[in-house]
Image: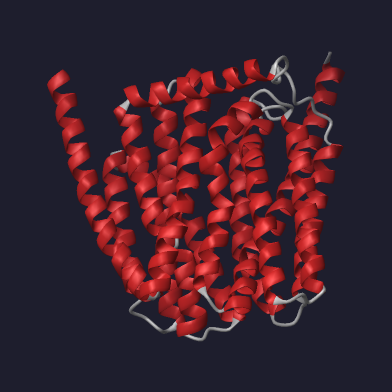
Amino acid sequence: MGSRIYMENLSRRGNNWVYLLSVVSDNLGSSLMTFVLPLIVLDLTGSGIHLSIISSFETLPFLLLGLPFGAIVDRCDVRKVLIRSDAIRFGGYALLAAVLSARSNATVTLIAIYLVTLVIGCTNVFSSVSEITFISYFVSKSDYSKMNSIVYGIQYTAGLLIPLAGGALYSVVPMGLLALICAACFLLSAGAILLMRVGSSKGASGLRGPVPAAVRTVISDTRQGLSYLKTRRVVLYPLVLAALFNMLTGNFQNDSLVIMRKSLSFTSGQVGLVMSVTAMGALAGTFIVNLLNRSFKFETVLIANFLVQMCFRLLFVAFGNIFAVAATLFVVDLCQSVLNIIIITNRQNLVETRYLGRVTSIYKAVLIGVNSLGFIYGGTLSNTFGPRNAVLWSGVEILILTMIGIGAYAHLNKERTTDE
């Protein structure tokens, strides 16, 4: 008996290390491509509108496919989903590396980037829904928090270090080779998951049987989540406010990159330094969010977050010094990190366990998917009036949204008081 428990614990620890290897390689590839791809597009076209289009391709699949894909993944072997997702990303970036290495003309290269981005955007819907579920197959419930903290720590560390390395490499390493390095990272990630000794299909019934029946099952699961959400305004309001905020600010990162490269003439190394500092802001947000949650109500932190982000986004366009730019973006990313975490925590606190999966799928589909609308809307404003004016206008919009949020929660709190 003792020997069996020892072997199970040993196997579990082995799975943990192999999974973390997959997480590290996955985040290295994602962070490097996230940094390099906008620079490639901007250098190819000189226009910020293409950045917005490509960014919308990355997030639009979440809006269109997030709900049905989430229901489908619940019925699949998530280990196989993750392996196949990594394999598709490897193939996509390997193809992009070949196009970049062939030094095709700008139009052909841009079309290849569009196609690869769209395919990988669809793939990311499956993998993002699966990766959280997969942990439950080899980590005990008491260790969920620890494993999630390690995973997020790896993600933020990659976001901190990769821009520094990417900024230095971009000016000396061929674009095709950088894309190939990204592809290799996803191949390593798939190989690591393939080596794990873990069953990941318990309770996964799949979508067997006639196609109409499978479609009805997916639709039924999705409707249950939507019906629940409509009856719980305390859960619905944060989703609506956060979705509107994401749409209004979705193109800010692209606008800031255009401003740094075109208006301020920052080098790729300087851009990498600024992005590393902003990643430090996101990491800092994970440390202070628990204190904020303990000290203030959710709606207080939410509204204050909107106001602080509005102020520092406006300050960003007023500065031309690299240190001032980095400082303002540090605060913006800190606030965005806090916003993401309080939205997740509030949902977990309010939603019953039996509905949490469906509601989470809706939140993920809306909050990530609506960014695509933000990229199109913000990109159009930026292309028409310039990135600085687009950021200034978004500040006015955030102020209006903040007033709406204050009114919505005042009405909700009044109803609560009346009911009591």
Q: Is residue 302 left or right of residue 139?
A: left
Point 61% across, 73% down: residue:
39
Point 59% across, 64% down: residue:
160
Residue 420 in view in this figure? no
Point 49% across, 83% down: residue:
262
Where is residue 326? Give x, y as percent.
46, 73
Residue 394 versus residue 413 in the image, above or below = below
Quadrant housing residue 271: bottom right
Quadrant housing residue 330: bottom left
Instruction: Classify the position of the N terminus by image quarter.
Output: top right
Judging from the image, the colouring scheme is secondary structure
Where is residue 28? Give x, y as percent.
70, 58
Residue 102 versus residue 354 in the image, above or below = below
Where is residue 370? Give x, y as percent.
45, 47
Where is residue 118? Give x, y as percent.
64, 52
Quadrant housing residue 172: bottom right
Point 67% across, 64% down: residue:
111
Residue 419 versus residue 385 in the image, above or below = above
Residue 375 versus residue 333: which sits nearer the camera? 375
Residue 399 in view in this figure? yes
